[in-house]
Amino acid sequence: MRKQPMIGDFVSYGFNGDAYPDSKVTRITPTGIVVTESGRRYRPDGHGNHKMGSCWYLMVGNFDETNPSF
């Protein structure tokens, strides 16, 4: 399970070894949806993680990395 975001945390989103910075968490709804300054929304997936769309996972921290195998 990933570290749970808190309001004010810098977050990034990632998939398959790639990670991109997003912005700060501005709101967490009562249902657990995480909203960032950029307007992106991450929904809880029922396994302790948060996802945007079908494959982008929320990560707490500011990451800008690409998978070197591509």
Image (cartoon, grey):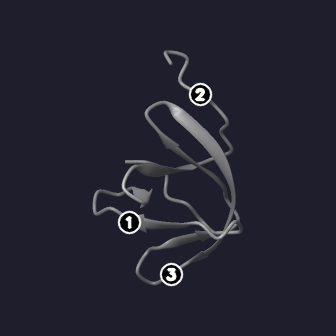
Furthest-left residue in this view? 46
Per the image, label 3 sits on a secondary structure element best described as: loop
> Earlier along the polypeptide chain: callout 1 or callout 2?
1
Residue 67 lies left or right of residue 7; in this view the side is: left
- Separation of disc 1 and disc 2 at Cα? 24 Å
Label disc, if present, on residue 44 of the rendered structure:
1
Per the image, label 1 sits on a secondary structure element best described as: strand
Residue 51: x and y, percent?
A: 42, 58
At label 1, counting other C-alpha atoms closer than 10 Å, the crowd grade (few under 14, some 14-19, many 20 or more) is some
- Separation of disc 2 and disc 3 at Cα? 31 Å
Residue 11: x and y, percent?
A: 63, 53
The type of residue carrying mark 2 is Thr
Task: Give the residue pinned by disc 3.
Answer: 29
> Earlier along the polypeptide chain: callout 2 or callout 3?
3
Furthest-front residue in this view? 70
- Separation of disc 3 and disc 1 at Cα? 11 Å
Task: Give the residue pinned by disc 2.
Answer: 66
Furthest-top residue in this view? 69
Q: Are marks 3 and 1 in contact (CB under 8 Å)?
A: no
Residue 7 location, quadrant = bottom right
Residue 25: x and y, percent?
A: 65, 66
